């Protein structure tokens, strides 16, 4: 049975035929030893056909399809042209060796070409990859490396395409840094407390907060210099005048030892460093809140920014968290306890990182497990919406939070919660209305921006029309313009006639009375003719009515 090998190189598809396998035997170790020697391997494997890619874009498309286990039309035509035809109802006398089992199954489903993929075939393909430039004679030295480098860059670039505003890696780094800062600030503030307590031990009992303690220690410096003048500054830091007075009184009767000026300077510098770290921690928290609202707004509004960021960082990415079922999300962060319980056959943990949510803390001890399961369900829904939705919005997160609140009331007071279908319908309607309002406002703004332009265009059009009225009337010959020109001509004729009459009256003053009498006579005749015509029409109408 003949064996053909399909090799997908960076420059094109290559088909090899393996011959003389009986001498080597179907043993992967023997093939592994023969791969290194080109003379021995060249007798076993020979090139039958090679089809280069049309372009770099075509190579990238072929590489993507092969990685997904799909056969393209180019690959199908290449195999059908160079492999023996498979007759229906009969066993084929050859098989095709493929590196990817998914690709082999797809080739067999579409073309009925038998494919195999195993350790033996992989070793043969490893030898082909090693000596590929020797099999193809037209390849120049360095061409194959350039093709591999270009295809690798384009393939990795296509795989790493993402939206810059939705990079969850920034959230992962920020939450890691936030946790480490919390540990460092706690340890450094404890060091400040121990260091300054040698000088002013009573201050520890009065001021409990680490950040405020560092501020007060920096302000006081030497306790012997404490006086009532420091009370306003202390009240500004602590927010309590009684505590400020208590600190001043304790400084006067303090049992601590005196420190040298150099020691006090070092304590102050270290206290300032702790204050700077605390300020940076606040800024980092604000940054994390804004990034979580951009990347996972629904998850942040449901469970909080810090807990949501911890879930994303523990899962690895937002897509990994979206792929997790709710049962996995529920115990995310409690893997050690889970495997210990499975090993010892004890009780499995009810919650992991999700325990830091306020909902589980508010639930009773009896209902903590139920609440964790329900909250994990809602978190998985929110993470999937954030991951796969095109537009980010907090509508679904707020609705899911309302559902969790209703479930808490149901466990405590027995109030029946709303159904999930009704809540999701209301959320979808609100998102659709928000999208409609957004586009409506956007169109209004665009119309307002376009209005001054349209007014200027209209003004210019009016000016052009005024200047071009005469030539347009001559060329187009519109009916309205013709009527206007006729009226103008009639008015001009009347003016001309009136001027002629006036001239005749001036020259023939004596004959003016005769002409006036003639005109009056003509007018009377016209009136009589009109009256006779009207009387005749009335007589005709009466006759018709009588008939």
Image (cartoon, helix red, strand yellow):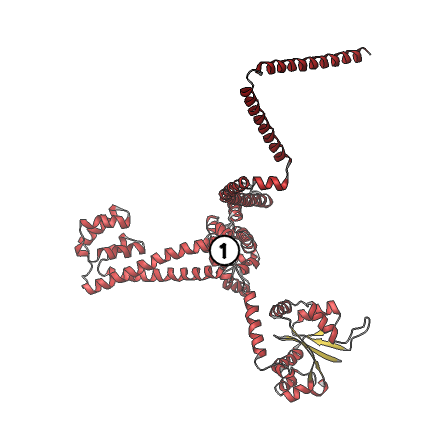
Q: Residue at x 57, y 59 (%)?
A: 323
**Residue 413 appears in the picture as rendered:** no
Q: Looking at the picture, how far across and down is residue 546, in whole percent?
A: 80, 10
> Quick check: 402 above or below 77?
above
The image quadrant of residue 119 is bottom right
Viewer-nearest residue: 162 or 507: 507
Q: Residue at x 65, y 89 (%)?
A: 39
Give the left or right position of residue 190, taking residue 123 as reference. left
Q: Looking at the picture, how far across and down is residue 35, in whole percent?
A: 63, 85
> Quick check: 130 above or below 200?
below
Q: Residue at x 56, y 26 (%)?
A: 495
Q: Secondary structure at mark 1?
A: helix
The image quadrant of residue 217 is bottom left
Label 1: how many Cα within 10 Å (few below 14, some 14–19, many 20+): many
Looking at the rendered image, the quarter that the C terminus falls into is top right
Looking at the rendered image, the quarter that the N terminus falls into is bottom right
> Quick check: 19 above or below 463?
below
Viewer-nearest residue: 184 or 470: 470
> Quick check: 268 above or below 393?
below
Instruction: Report which residue position mark 1 lands on.
Output: 295
Q: Looking at the picture, how far across and down is residue 210, in whole percent?
A: 31, 56
Viewer-nearest residue: 91 or 44: 44
Q: Looking at the picture, how far across and down is residue 30, in whole percent?
A: 65, 86
């Amino acid at each position: 049975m003949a064996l053909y090998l399909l090799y997908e190189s960076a420059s094109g598809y290559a088909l090899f035929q393996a011959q003389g396998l009986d001498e080597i035997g179907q043993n992967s170790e023997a093939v592994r030893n023969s791969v290194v020697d080109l003379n021995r391997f060249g007798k076993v494997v020979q090139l039958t056909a090679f089809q280069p890619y049309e372009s770099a874009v075509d190579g990238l498309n072929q590489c993507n399809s092969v990685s997904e286990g799909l056969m393209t039309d180019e690959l199908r035509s290449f195999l059908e042209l160079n492999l023996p035809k498979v007759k229906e109802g009969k066993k084929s006398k050859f098989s095709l060796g493929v590196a990817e089992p998914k690709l082999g199954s797809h080739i067999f489903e579409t073309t009925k070409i038998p494919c195999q993929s195993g350790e033996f075939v992989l070793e043969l393909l490893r030898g082909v990859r090693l000596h590929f430039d020797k099999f193809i004679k037209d390849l120049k030295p360095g061409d194959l490396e350039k093709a591999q480098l270009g295809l690798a860059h384009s393939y990795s670039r296509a795989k790493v395409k993402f939206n810059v505003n939705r990079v969850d890696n920034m959230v992962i780094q920020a939450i890691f840094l936030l946790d480490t800062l919390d540990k460092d600030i706690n340890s450094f503030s404890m060091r400040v407390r121990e260091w300054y307590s040698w000088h002013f031990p009573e201050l520890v009992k009065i001021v409990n907060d680490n950040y405020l303690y560092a501020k007060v220690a920096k302000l006081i410096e030497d306790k012997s210099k404490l006086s009532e003048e420091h009370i306003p500054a202390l009240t500004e830091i602590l927010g309590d005048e009684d505590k400020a007075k208590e600190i001043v009184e304790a400084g006067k009767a303090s049992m601590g030892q005196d420190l040298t000026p150099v020691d006090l300077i070092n304590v102050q510098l270290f206290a300032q460093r702790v204050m700077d770290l605390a300020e940076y921690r606040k800024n980092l928290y604000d940054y994390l809140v804004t990034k979580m609202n951009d990347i996972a707004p629904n998850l942040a509004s449901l469970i909080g920014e810090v807990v949501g960021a911890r879930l994303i960082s523990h899962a690895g990415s937002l897509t990994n968290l979206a792929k997790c079922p709710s049962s996995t999300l529920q115990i995310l962060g409690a893997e050690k306890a889970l495997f210990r319980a499975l090993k010892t056959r004890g009780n499995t943990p009810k919650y992991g990182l999700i325990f830091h949510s306020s909902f589980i803390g508010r639930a009773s001890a009896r209902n903590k497990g139920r609440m964790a399961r329900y909250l994990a369900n809602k978190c998985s829904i929110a993470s999937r919406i954030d991951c796969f939705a095109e537009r980010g919005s907090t509508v679904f997160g707020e609705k899911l939070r309302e559902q969790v609140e209703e479930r808490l009331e149901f466990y405590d007071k027995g109030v029946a919660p709303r159904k999930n279908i009704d809540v999701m319908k209301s959320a979808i309607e609100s998102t659709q209305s928000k999208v409609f309002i957004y586009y409506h406002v956007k169109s209004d703004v665009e119309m307002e921006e376009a209005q001054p332009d349209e007014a200027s265009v209209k003004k210019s059009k009016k000016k052009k029309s005024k200047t071009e009225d005469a030539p347009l009337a001559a060329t187009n010959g519109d009916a309205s313009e013709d009527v206007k020109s006729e009226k103008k001509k009639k008015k001009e004729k009347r003016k001309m006639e009136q001027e002629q009459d006036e001239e005749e009256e001036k020259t023939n003053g004596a004959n003016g009375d005769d002409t006036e009498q003639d005109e009056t006579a003509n007018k009377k005749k016209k009136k009589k003719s009109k009256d006779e015509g009207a009387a005749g029409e009335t007589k005709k109408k009466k006759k018709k009515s009588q008939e």
